[in-house]
Amino acid sequence: MGSERRKALFVLGVLAWLAGCAPTTMSPMVMRLGPGHPDHSYFQAGLRGGPRLSAPFTDGAEPPLFAGDEKPFSTQQWSMAYDVALTEPLTDRLSLHLGLQGEFFYPLPMPGYGVYAGLSTYFGNPRWGLAPAFVLRGASDLGIDSRGGPGTIVGAEGSVAFSLTPDPGVALGLVPFVGFHQVFSGDHSATASYYGAALAVQVPLDRLTRLELSGGFGKAKTGSSDTWTAPIMGTRWGR
């Protein structure tokens, strides 16, 4: 029995190593397209993409793993991640945002996990307006030497969503953002910046649910690394 248990633990360890990914930096974290509903919360779940800010620390590896702008979709420096978010209204204009992420690679969400929390407020009317937001985030792959890592990030992001609602239930938005993070990878540590903008659209699926599509580009830089382009794309279901 003991031998079977050790074998099971070994297999799980190998799977964890294979699935290990440095955390993806999904941005903009908050895309508030409209005033929202002050009387009930809004739940979203889906996939979103972004850079692995710890990737430049692997630049000295053989063969080279970090390619910068030569390979913007390389999974060593960019990936998709599960995103689960909850928007909880505090007042007619102020909302609390909470979120979780898990890496998509292989495709089990292990062990790159992250959490974020922030606030947004809305200025305008039901048809058009802007919503500034501030978010704190942290994520880690638990120190496992994996694709794009090991990597742990702690930081903050600011964004502003400019939105338009041409028809009931339909929302269009432009969301510029800028974020700064402290990145840890093994014995290395550096400050990383990530800035850019995303276009987003929300369309109704039925009376209560929405589909959100987003896309754009960002620029990432970790420590003394070259700045590299990070494609932004995602899709989320909301209710």
Image: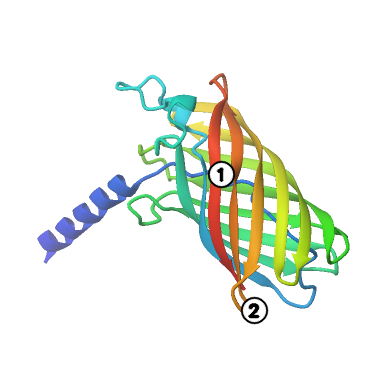
Q: Alpha-carbon neighbours of circle 2 within 10 Å: few (<14), some, or many (≥20)?
A: few
Task: Residue 110 in the image: state x and y as whole percent.
Answer: 38, 53
Q: Residue furthest front?
A: 166
Q: Which mark is residue 208?
A: 2
Task: Residue 60 in the image: state x and y as whole percent.
Answer: 38, 19
Q: Is residue 237 above or below residue 68?
A: below
Task: Residue 229 in the image: state x and y as whole percent.
Answer: 55, 31
- The part of the image, by quadrant, that contains residue 216 is top right
Q: At 52% from the left edge and 34% from the top edge, which residue is drawn?
A: 53
Q: Residue furthest right?
A: 124
- Along the horizontal axis of the image, is 73 left or right of 146? right
Q: Residue furthest bottom?
A: 207
What amino acid type is highlighted by mark number 1? Ile
Q: Is residue 185 above or below residue 198?
A: above
Asked if marks 1 and 2 touch (Cβ < 8 Å), the reply is no
Closer to us: 133 or 149:
133
Closer to us: 90 or 77:
77
User: In this figure, which residue is indicated by the disc labeled 1?
Assistant: 232
Task: Kindly state the secondary structure of the residue where label 1 is placed.
Answer: strand
Q: At 49% from the left edge and 38% from the top edge, which residue is drawn?
A: 52
